[in-house]
Image (spheres, rainbow, N blue to C red):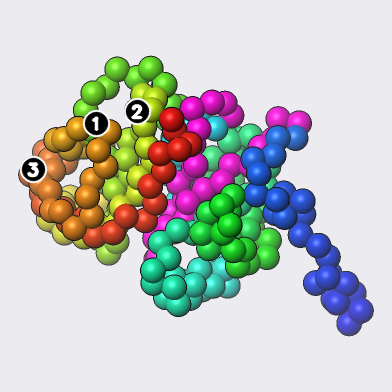
């Protein structure tokens, strides 16, 4: 038994976990994700303006307890590091981006394709909920700069609505909108889109307060962007 356990621990990681490239095998592809949040863990798909990555998606994930603790410790030990990425096994995106689906993945501190450091072995992830899933349109006629407010009473984020090409991917931590949840007491979690005045190609600035109008009450609420967690232009040129 002791020998068997030792052999199991010495097994190499699968090839998909050893190589960060968006491998494509038999229609299954690696869909890398940005991981963010603490008590509630969210994952934002890293999109491209080409198939099979032509989707913007935000999932709430359930990590194994030991991985969640590892992730929180890494955040606490590296306060200047805002980027953590998840490298899942190859799959067809629309097959796995469903509530209740599971897949294997490894966790990286930093961008897994740009020198990020692997900080976990392979573990099983469960999709708790799909907060956002939409196919990108490179010719979108929308001229309004907009973001999604995602989060809970305790922790909230803004995720840029990726519109026509070229665009950008942007995730910002914000102060939780207490007034919004006060007016919607039955709401435990939010994912709602709102417009932000300003040039379409100009990301929100961290530290610069703004007032937004959120459904369903369409009440003006203050938000304070605190910190950019991730911003990407190159992949969405």
The residue carrying mark 3 is: 219
Residue 83 appears in which quarter of the rendering? Answer: bottom left
- Say whether residue 35 is magenta: yes
Tell me which residue sits at (41%, 43%) in the image: 232
Residue 58 numbered tag: none
Q: Which residues are magenta?
A: 26-52
- Say whether residue 18 is magenta: no
Locate residue 112 relative to residue 25 in the image: left or right: left
Locate residue 108 relative to residue 81 in the image: left or right: right
Locate residue 176 relative to residue 68 in the image: left or right: left
Of the two numbered discs 3 and 2 on the same chain, state the one appearing first in sequence: 2
Residue 186 location in percent, x, y?
Answer: 23, 52
Whole-number angstrom distance, CA of label 3 to CA of label 1: 23 Å
Q: Is residue 93 above or below residue 59?
A: above
Question: Circle 3: is it few (<14), some (14-19), or many (20+) Cα within 10 Å?
Answer: some
Residue 200 appears in which quarter of the rendering? Answer: top left
Q: Is residue 10 visible?
A: yes
Q: Is residue 190 visible?
A: no
Q: Are marks 2 and 1 in contact (CB under 8 Å)?
A: yes
Residue 156 location in percent, x, y?
Answer: 28, 56
Residue 3 location in percent, x, y?
Answer: 92, 79
Quadrant for the N terminus in the image: bottom right
Residue 163 numbered tag: 2
Quadrant for the C terminus in the image: top left
The residue carrying mark 1 is: 200
Tell me which residue sits at (47%, 51%) in the image: 34
Q: Is residue 134 above or below residue 90?
A: above
Q: Secondary structure at mark 1?
A: loop
Whole-number angstrom distance, CA of label 3 to CA of label 2: 25 Å
Question: Circle 2: is it few (<14), some (14-19), or many (20+) Cα within 10 Å?
Answer: many
């Amino acid at each position: 038994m002791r020998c068997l356990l030792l052999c199991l621990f010495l097994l190499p990681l699968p090839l998909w976990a050893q190589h960060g490239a968006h491998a494509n095998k038999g229609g299954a592809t690696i869909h890398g994700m940005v991981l963010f949040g603490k008590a509630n863990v969210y994952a934002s798909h890293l999109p491209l303006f080409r198939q099979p990555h032509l989707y913007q998606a935000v999932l709430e994930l359930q990590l194994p307890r030991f991985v969640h603790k590892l992730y929180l410790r890494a955040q606490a030990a590296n306060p200047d590091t805002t980027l953590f990425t998840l490298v899942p096994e190859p799959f067809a995106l629309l097959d796995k981006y469903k509530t209740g689906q599971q897949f294997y993945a490894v966790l990286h501190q930093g961008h897994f394709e740009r020198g990020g450091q692997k900080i976990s072995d392979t573990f099983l992830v469960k999709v708790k909920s799909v907060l956002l899933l939409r196919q990108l349109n490179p010719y979108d006629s929308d001229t309004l700069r907009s973001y999604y407010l995602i989060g809970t009473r305790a922790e909230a984020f803004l995720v840029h609505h990726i519109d026509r090409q070229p665009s950008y991917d942007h995730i910002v931590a914000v102060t939780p909108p207490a007034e919004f949840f006060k007016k919607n007491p039955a709401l435990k979690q939010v994912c709602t889109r709102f417009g932000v005045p300003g040039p379409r190609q100009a990301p929100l600035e961290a530290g610069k307060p703004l007032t937004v109008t959120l459904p369903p009450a369409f009440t003006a609420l203050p938000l304070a962007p605190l910190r950019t967690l991730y911003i990407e232009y190159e992949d969405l040129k």
